[in-house]
Amino acid sequence: MKTDEMLRAGFVGLGAMGAPMARRLDAAGRLAAVWNRTPGRLDAFVREHAVLKCDSPAAVARAAPVVITCVSADGDLVEVVDQLLPALGKDGVVIDCSTVSLDTARAAAARVQAAGAGFLDAPVSGGVEGARRGTLAMMVGGDQMLLERVRPLLSCMAARIEHMGPVGSGQATKAVNQIMAAGINQAVTEALAFAEAHVLPLDKVIDVVSGGAAGNWFLAHRGRTMIDGEFAAGFKVALHHKDLEICRRMAASLGVALPVVEMTLVHYRRLMQAGYGDEDISALFREKHALFERGAREQADKTRSR
């Protein structure tokens, strides 16, 4: 496998995260071929980029020594890996940037390695904005020497690339990230709904709090849009729900329940049932706003009944 600056990759999965990641590779002259399960997304991508349009994951593997995958769920990854296997060269590499369970990452690695190729689990954090700007944080599990061989490719998409340990360690680290994201989402949306209920100037609240100990990325990047009722997807509710189910299973295997995760799963289910599953996770503000509205109505009813 090439190890110089001319190393190129194929990309499988052109969704909300995958497409901008692939664009970063193409801008650096490192994207050789692409495939996506939904033909419309694939056609739209190749109209904009002079890369090989493939009719299968196997065709991507035949076109490039490295295949980067970014799909939505465990079953999708298993399906893609099964299709890649016959076409993987002895020196090929599969780098999975999806968020899947630790067990699925290990199973995929075992199948790829049995075919003589290498595997890295490399989930990312930073949202659609980070994917577009190439500022993602990437958590990598697998052989460190293999990581160094493909680092020039990953550096096109991520500003921070950290080796976390053997295969599965990237996914375990991503689970940590997703648990924290749930807690931050809960805290920020609840606090801003609390501020709204006290008729505070929310723009000023966001400014002053962002400059103090409670300041965080989510407040800075989602605070104003959520108070304006705008929830364009950066990270979809349905996808975070899927990830938190993985976290819950991982914790359960250790005999532990995660209260923040459990609460967030309940809230996300309500949002999904109400038709908001494709909105950004900041749509949790809808739930918190409604909570305070219900509380105010109940207080008003109690006052009138006295």
Image (cartoon, rainbow, N blue to C red):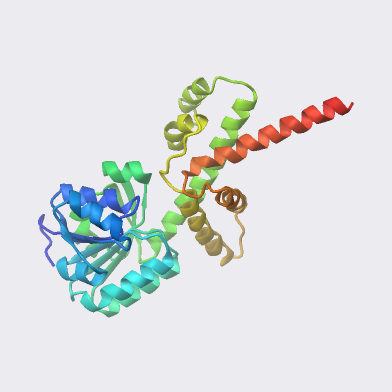
249 sits to left or right of 32: right
Residue at image x 18%, y 53%? Answer: 152
Front residue of 180 and 294: 294
Front residue of 95 and 62: 62
Residue at image x 49%, y 44%? Answer: 281
Q: How many marks?
A: 0
Residue at image x 55%, y 19%? Answer: 201
Residue 47 location in percent, x, y?
19, 51
Residue 272 location in percent, x, y?
55, 51
**Quarter of the image that includes the C terminus:** top right
Residue 170 location in percent, x, y?
38, 59
Whether residue 150 is visible here, answered yes or no, is: yes
Picture quarter containing residue 101?
bottom left
Whether residue 155 is visible here, answered yes or no, is: no
40 sits to left or right of 10: right
Q: Does 16 sit above or below residue 197?
A: below
Q: Does 220 sit above or below residue 282?
A: above
**Quarter of the image that includes the N terminus:** bottom left
Front residue of 32 and 188: 32
126 sits to left or right of 276: left
207 sits to left or right of 68: right
Picture quarter containing residue 171?
bottom left
Extreme residue in the right direction: 306
